Amino acid sequence: MVTDRFTRACLLTIVLLLAVIAFRPLLQPDHAHAAQGSQYKVIPITIFAPTPSGVETEQALKKYAADGWELTAAPFWINSGYPEQGRGLLIFRK
């Protein structure tokens, strides 16, 4: 009989402690953190098939990297009317 009561008391204690652990995030939520503001800069580039403007693109990359900007994306598309001419963007984030 004593062992049965002791086992039930231990199991009840375990269940109560697990319930406290499970419901603690609901009763005491984490603090909200403000979103960190970022600045973006978009640089349009034009690339021609016979003479690519890679030098201008490289200069832009070096210039903004020296100023602390990080290249985030560089989307590129081809003009359907002029397939030899492509356009793109350099998107920087600081």
Image (cartoon, helix red, strand yellow):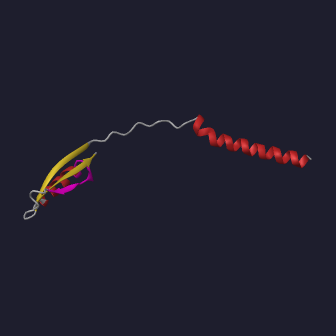
- Name the quadrant containing residue 17: top right
User: What count of labels does the image hold?
Assistant: 0
Q: Nearer the viewer, residue 7 or 60?
A: 7
* Residue appearing at x 11%, y 61% in the figure: 83
Q: Quadrant of the C terminus?
A: top left
Judge whether 25 appears above or below 80 on screen: above
Q: Position of residue 22 (x, y in %)?
A: 63, 43
Q: Which residues are magenta?
A: 65-78
Residue 68 visible at all: no
Q: Position of residue 2 (x, y in %)?
A: 91, 46
Q: Nearer the viewer, residue 15 or 61?
A: 15
Q: Nearer the viewer, residue 71 or 73?
A: 73
Left or right of 34 on screen, residue 38: left
Left or right of 56 on screen, residue 70: right
* Residue appearing at x 76%, y 43% in the figure: 13
- Name the quadrant containing residue 59: bottom left
